[in-house]
Image (spheres, rainbow, N blue to C red):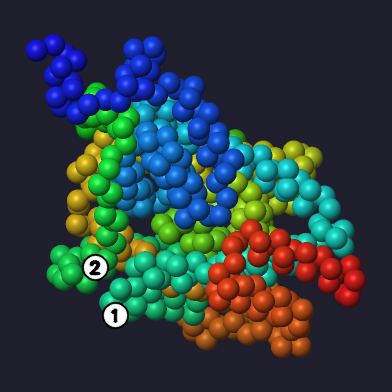
Amino acid sequence: MDTHQRTSDRIGPVPCAAERARRRYGHPIPFSDAVRVWVRIACLSFGGPAGQIAVMHRILVEEKRWIGERRFLHALNYCMLLPGPEAQQLATYIGWLLHRTAGGLAAGTLFVLPGFVSILILSLLYAGYRDVPAVDGIFFGVKAAVLAVVAEAVLRIGRRVLRNATMYVIAAAAFIAIFFFDLAFPLIVLGAALIGFLGGRLDPDRFLVLQGHKPEAHAATLDALLDDGGAQAAAPGWRRAARTAAIWLALWLIPVIALLAALGSEHVFSQIAVFFSKLAVVTFGGAYAVLAYMAQEAVQTHGWVSPGEMLDGLGLAETTPGPLIMVVQFVGFLGAFRDAGALNPYVAGVLASVLATWVTFVPCFLWIFLGAPFVERLRDNRALSTALAGITAAVVGVILNLALWFGLHVVFGRVAQHHVGPLRLLAPDFATLDPAALVLSAGALVAVLRLHIGMVPTLAACAACGLAWRLLVA
């Protein structure tokens, strides 16, 4: 029996189109075709992780049929275990499946690139023209819409994970810990992971709440690539894992160490490099959990941005393609812009944007390239699944804290903090209540939560209302 016959017996019949492509290119999916598809996905990746994953599913599974439903969900389940933006990591993982390291680099980089360029341009405009009434009005409206988007995220993630009383208790405990006691987000993540891990061993039925979707009966016609020397060719091996870890840890950490050595730990570039490196490791739960952590550190500790500017940054990330976590780029830009030292503020902001993006996304490639060959083993690991359930439940409480924190700062001009021992209380000054902000926020909440109007129309409508208010009424 020849090689072709043995392969056909193993993977089933290969469609004629795939076979013709194999004979012509030596690969069923030419790399250039894949790059064009990744560019298309990147330009359509609006609407947060749910919308981005839906775009990838529609194009890769339903339209191109490059990867089957089972493999797609398998990859998604793995990416859900990781810190960082799951949609970008999913693109990187599927790119790796199709064309190994080159494919993963192309998919992951192109997924980020349009958003990076867009937010960089908008950050430059924001820094230079923020005080123009028209610009101020637009961002005034955007804040109200973003508050509604964050509130919707609480409900969406809550419906996914809060399946029993135990999960509600974890979420409530996380909310109390961060809102009333200002506990650091990484400690909440570690505590929730430990609870999930131990709880899964003692009572797994209460903690195995994150179940993957059932796969469709059909499989992608070009899934044969992954079976025929694709995913199986990169068998897990510790030598390969050590080499991969060394390369990507060097790419990630050498710039951080170099900045610390050259500029010292107090320089804004060093602080940005260290802070966003830490953030890349603990940001389970996506961009909204990132914002909760940044609200603690970037706003309160470092003073890089104000609460209102954090909302502006999320508004920019919501309305541009790419992961919502790109808000880190905006925060880094403003932090360096205001503490540029001898540099031109705009040059410092651009360099900080690149730095924040680098230390945020290089770890994403590390997690995928290091873990992808082991993914079959990780897929059914109960300990990881229950730890993730604990983390995700805690993230619901963290994002609820974020929604309330943002809401207070949107509606009130001044919010004071009072400490009673370890207890922290936020006390809004009711004399600074902004009726326009209250009405616009309430309207955005009704639009998103009650009328189920999409994110982009809600943002556009709120921006238009904010612009009209600032120009015509205020």
x%, y% of residue 417? 61, 80
* Residue found 49% across the figure and 73% down from its top: 400
Give the left or right position of residue 397, taking residue 245 as reference: right
Give the left or right position of residue 115, taking residue 141 as reference: left
**Residue 292 can be seen in this image:** yes
Depicted 22 relative to depicted 135: above or below = above
Give the residue at mark 2: 207
For the N terminus, the quadrant is top left
How far apart are labels 2 and 1 at the CA level?
Answer: 11 Å
Q: How many marks?
A: 2
* Residue found 85% across the figure and 60% down from its top: 134
For badge 2, the amino acid type reads: Phe
For badge 1, the amino acid type reads: Ala
Depicted 144 relative to depicted 90: above or below = below
Among the two numbered marks 2 and 1 on one chain, the one whose residue lies closer to the N terminus: 1
In depth, the one of 418 and 126 nearer the eye is: 126
In depth, the one of 413 and 466 nearer the eye is: 466
Depicted 330 relative to depicted 292: above or below = above
Give the residue at mark 1: 165
Residue at the bottom extreme of this rendering: 430
Q: Residues within 10 Å of mark 2 (few under 14, many from 20)?
A: many
x%, y% of residue 268? 64, 48
